[in-house]
Image (cartoon, helix red, strand yellow):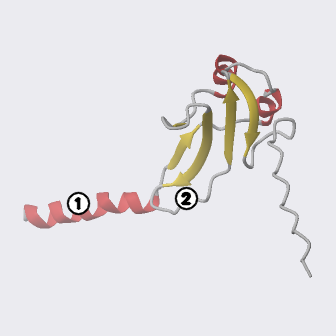
C-alpha cells in the first residue's frame, strides 16, 4: 500500500477533529452574586483584590479605576458582549462602581440631565 495516500488520509481525518470539538475559552474573573454583594464602599484595594481577584484590565492612565470583564465563548465563534464591572477608588479606598454587574449600593449616581434654558422673547 502506498504511503502517501495513507498520510494524506490521516492528516485529513486528524484535522477534522478540530471541526467537531471547540473548547470553551474563559477569560477574566467571573464574579458571583455573593462576591458582588460583599463589595462595600470604603473597602481598601487589598480587600477588593482578595474578594474579586486581580483585575484583568489594568490601565496605566487611570490607576484609580479597575475594570473586571469576564467572557465565555467557544473557539472560532464570535464572543458575546461581556458584562462589565468598573470600580473607582479615591485615596486607595473603594468609592463607587458602574457597569452591568455593579451592586446597587455602589452604583455611581447618574448625572442629572441639563435643564433647558427658558426661551428669551
Q: Is residue 87 left or right of residue 41?
A: left
Q: Name the quadrant of the N terminus.
A: bottom left
Say which mark, if any, is on residue 36: none
Q: Quadrant of residue 12?
A: bottom left
Most foreground residue, 10 or 18: 18
Circle 2 SS class: loop
Q: CA distance from mark 1 to mark 2?
A: 29 Å
- Residue 68 image point, x, y percent: 62, 39
| Residue position marked by numbered label 1 in the rendering | 11
Can residue 1 be seen? no
Most foreground residue, 61 or 70: 61
Vertical arrangement, residue 100 with respect to residue 78, above or below: above
Q: Residues within 10 Å of mark 2 (few under 14, many from 20)?
A: few
Q: Quadrant of residue 51?
A: top right
| Residue position marked by numbered label 2 in the rendering | 79
Q: Is residue 73 left or right of residue 3?
A: right
Q: Quadrant of residue 38?
A: top right
Look at discs 1 and 2 and give the one toward the viewer: 2
The residue at 38%/58% (across/down) is 17
Can residue 114 be seen? yes
Circle 1 SS class: helix
Amino acid at each position: 500500500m502506498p504511503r502517501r495516500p495513507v498520510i494524506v488520509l490521516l492528516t485529513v481525518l486528524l484535522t477534522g477533529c478540530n471541526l467537531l470539538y471547540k473548547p470553551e475559552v474563559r477569560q477574566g474573573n467571573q464574579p458571583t452574586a455573593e462576591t458582588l454583594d460583599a463589595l462595600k464602599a470604603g473597602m481598601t484595594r487589598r480587600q477588593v483584590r482578595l474578594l474579586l481577584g486581580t483585575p484583568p484590565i489594568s490601565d496605566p492612565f487611570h490607576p484609580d479605576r479597575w475594570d473586571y470583564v469576564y467572557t465565555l465563548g467557544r473557539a472560532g465563534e464570535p464572543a458575546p458582549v461581556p458584562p462589565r464591572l468598573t470600580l473607582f477608588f479615591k485615596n486607595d479606598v473603594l468609592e463607587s462602581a458602574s457597569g452591568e454587574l455593579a451592586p446597587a449600593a455602589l452604583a455611581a449616581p447618574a448625572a442629572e440631565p441639563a435643564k433647558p434654558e427658558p426661551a428669551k422673547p
